[in-house]
Image (spheres, grey):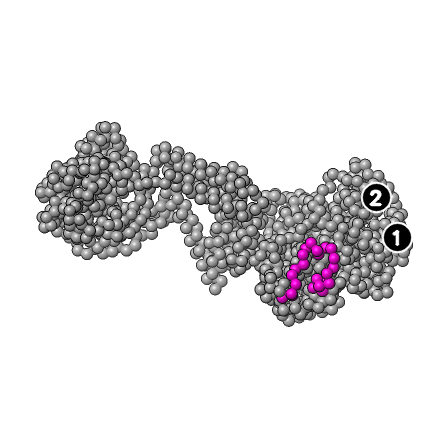
Amino acid sequence: MNVLGLSFDYHDSSAALIKDGVLVAAASEERFSRVKHDSSLPKLAVEFAIQKGGITRDELDWVVFYEKPFVKFERMLLTGLATFPRSAGVFRESMQRWVSDKLWVKSHMARKLGVPKKKLLFAEHHMSHAAASFFTSPFADSAILTVDGAGEWTTATMGIGRGNKIELLKEMRFPHSLGLLYSAFTAYCGFEINEGEYKLMGMHPYGTPRYTDKIKQLIEVGEDGSLWHDMRYFSYHFSRNDTLSTAFEEHFGRPRRDPKESDKSLDPYYCDMAASIQAVTEEVLLKMLPHLHEVSGGMKSVCLSGGVALNSVANYKLMRDGPFEEVYIHPAPGDDGGAAGAAYWAYNQICDQPRGPALDHAFLGSEYSDEQIEAFLRENDIPYEHIADDQAFYQFVAKALEEGQVCGWFRGRFEWGPRALGARSIIADPRRAEMKEKLNSTIKFREAFRPFAPSVLEERADEFFEIPNAEKHFPARFMLYVAPVRAEKRDVLPAITHEDGSGRLQTVFKDTNPGYHQMIKAFGDLTGVPVVMNTSFNLKGEPIVESPAHAFNTFSLSGMDLLLLHNFIIRADAKKKIAETRFHLRHEGDSVLQMVS
Amino acid sequence: MRLFNSILAAVVAILLFGGAMEGGLRLLGFGPPKTLNRFDAVTGWSKTPGLRTHRSSREYAVDFSFNDAGLREDQDVQPGSKDPERLRVLILGDSFVLGYSVQRENLFVDILDARWGDEAEAINVGTEGWATDQAVAWLESEGSKWQPDVVLLMPYENDLYWNTQEQYTRYPKPRYSELGERSQGELTDPGAAPLRDRSALARLILPKSSSLPRIESKGHSLLAEHGVLLAGGGPNGDAIRRHTQGCLKALANWAAKTDTKVLVCPIPAHSAVDETYAREVFGPRVLGGMPRDSWDANRPVDLFLELAAAEGLATVDPRQALITSLENGEQPYFSIDWHLNPVGNKVLAGVLHDELARLDWAPEGTHGATTLPAPEKSPLSTPALLYLLLVTVLGTIYCRLYPQEKPLRAYGLVGALLGLVFGLVLGSAALLDILPPDLGRVLSTVVVLALLGFIAWKLGDRVTIIAGVMGAFIRRGHWYLMPLLVILLTVGSLLVVAASSPLVAPFIYTLF
């Protein structure tokens, strides 16, 4: 049975194909279209998934959309009416989008994908999140927690998964939302919503959580972690441009930060605010989990999903301090992962098919053969070297890193989800403190405070990070934990150790990413540190590269020293502009309207 | 509660659908006729005081404005307002006198009034659908209050049949016996008209609750009121004579009692004046093709004249004047509507003026005018004013919504789109006026149906989405959202059509 899941019309539109219970392909449209956070119908991603699955469109049994548009439309109407006349502007704009486009999703899918309407299904937004996490987890039974900004009405759910069925037991509804609360502070600290949340998370170690009490005056937190917002302080339910009201700024005594300033420096006040909202977020989640543990009858494991599950700092604390023994998070816990979730929901829950294997890697995107890479290099007259022997190649890379060179690493199928996990990565030596600034200023062109992640061999992770039994922690495979760097190793790994001594580690497994594993091992053999600095292979505002052409273009526009396309080596003096690799360099984030609709 | 809300939502949805259909049908001209009347315990019905309305057809467009006394007159025309120095002429009859299809300036009553100037006044007591008995009953009840010097009774041929009836479809009415006595006293209010008479949609889907009585004659089916055209007045001939005679007797009695002069002027039907019309139109279409020699359109006029003379009432026959007008190349009647047009009214006014002058019952008109000047009109037509208003309003909204657009270009764009739409609409209307009315109506219906079909075709499978959204909202009990939903879905549907059809896009975008 072939089931295609789709998510689009919000941000990060994606397609995922399940073939007889196995997730064989999954990708975001932005990788192909080169439009950051592309929200359009993912025609290119669908084309890729079908081709990768080795099927035709006619062989699709079901095509599943990740949410129910009519219910979301209902929410927009009721919210607009409830806040009229303040909502007049947002209502007009949102209705314009809905009646001209979003309402006709079913028709668009049928026409543009050439699929009969009888094969189209619609899953609930949070069911898609829950399914993405539970059905790809290694757990037969598990508790499930989904938390994001807003789905149709739901902003968070608690549920239970047993075998091939999921039951959602409790939900929290719009406008009360942990995700939207976090986004409100993202905007307050001068970042773009639906874009700058991870910057806020990265900024929090520079501050002290001194405003948690003041934040809690804006909300009411139940013992079960449920939230109630005092809507006097927020405006995302009726405003086009603002997530927070004037009362919000008056409450804190300072205006929101000018977005133009946010990328330039670290203002202590806003760092404290970032630390405070991070602390409140963790506190709320750590109230939700015990309650979920209780209502699930003391289940041992939990599956997390939704955009809030991208908060790697909180994830680690939930694992460490929460009541569940094991935690699983899908590699794409946000709305992009909803595509896979919708497909799993239809396959397991609706069609009553048996569970497939757990998802132990995220390499579900497209790949290029040696022949294709070489053809690209030849066609564009790009000088290269090739080391046919893998071990020799890995030793060459290890040596280059050890010498302080920054390398673009392009190998195998690209990653599913927002993280670069060693298929489309920029890598460097984590022992060199100057690497952080070099990567930020000359390669990624981004804020100086932004941390970089380490990729560490799974079998030696515990040696460098506080993560015992690393092989058990699926989220660490997907770079979804920020764990403390062991105190004695912080000086060894200055480039990836964040202000608070933490690192957003990725554990690298020999069986799921052998090339990357062996390269890190070679680096470890050379330096005694089996860790490399890993950041996504893109420039600021650019989607992560997909093809050799994208990789070469990004390489050429940045300060990287080497480009490694499989075992092909391109040196910096080969950099040049090639025409066919355009992309939208800057994503401006979403408007408030886009965020809530 | 959820079930209740769902049912309520379904009801609201159905009502909205019905409302949309009703509006559409009315726009297409399938609406129920606007009523001018209300129940009256003496006459059965009378005009509604203070009513202002408009009626139009392919042939005419008429404004009605009734004063507080319930007459199509100026407000100062009241029972107690008689000027002792000015002769007062009350003119009674049905829609011909009311001026059903002509503006006041073209109605013979007002032409007479203008011609007499300050010496005499003509007061219009005509009421749609009145038979002779109702006019007389009104006179008996209200006439003295008006202190008329002269009463003009202007019966039409269908009065003869209805004078024999105590009911016009569902409406009670008075009837006079042969001796001139009203057979009914206080009439009973029949209540609100049935839904079918008030709704275009109901007219489309409900069977006719009542229709005008018909008779059979020599294998032909015709309206009972047309029986008077047959030899001997048709199957009701005796009753017609008796009851009409009674009406005129009562009129004569009232005139004697109040010392009022009465002139009876039967209005001839179109077919009594125009033989070509009688032979080619009225006979084949209205009388079901009865042989021309088996009916005579002059019989009603002759009968009225005979019966009135028998009661000693003065009479005048306007047929020859109308025939002369026709022979002079004029057309005194409308083509489809059976009433006199402005030309016919002018002729009729001349006949009445001359006869009353001849009788010395009314002065010779000193003003000489035979038609009133039309009311002054704005130098800009209504469409032009509407166009300018829309360009101003929509252009301003456009500028505010899209501030990056240069104002001149914004107004120009809006003006051009509106101009295109107005041009097409007005052009189509002009074309329809040129075409024969029946063809025009069919054509406009076909165009509208084709447009709806085009929209449905363009929407394609989205129709099921619309049904799905409606169904979802009904199931979730959002009855209060249904009006908004219908508007949004309509707008959305049109936008979808616009997006897929460059040809119609300008018209649809102009709507928004």
Query: Image check: B375 left or right of B21?
Result: left
The percent coordinates of residue B306 (x first, y second) are 12, 39
Which of the chains bears the disc numbered 1?
A
Which quarter of the rendering shows the C terminus of chain A?
bottom right
State the mark number for residue B366.
Answer: none
> In the image, which residues are magenta?
A251-273
Q: Is residue B179 visible?
A: no
Q: Residue furthest right?
A: A526
From what the image shows, is residue A140 above or below residue A406? Answer: below
From what the image shows, is residue B16 above or below residue B378? Answer: below
State the mark number for residue A402.
Answer: 1
Residue at image coords 64%, 53%:
A590
Q: Is residue B25 or residue B51 the one in the foreground?
A: B51
Q: Secondary structure at mark 1?
A: helix
- Dot 2 or dot 1: first in sequence order is 1
Q: Does the magenta run of residues contain A255?
A: yes
Where residue B225 sits, quadrant-wise, is top left
Q: Amino acid at mark 1?
A: Glu
Which of the chains bears the disc numbered 2?
A
Q: Does the magenta run of residues contain B363?
A: no
Residue at image coords 81%, 36%:
A381
Q: Which residue is mark 2?
A: A572
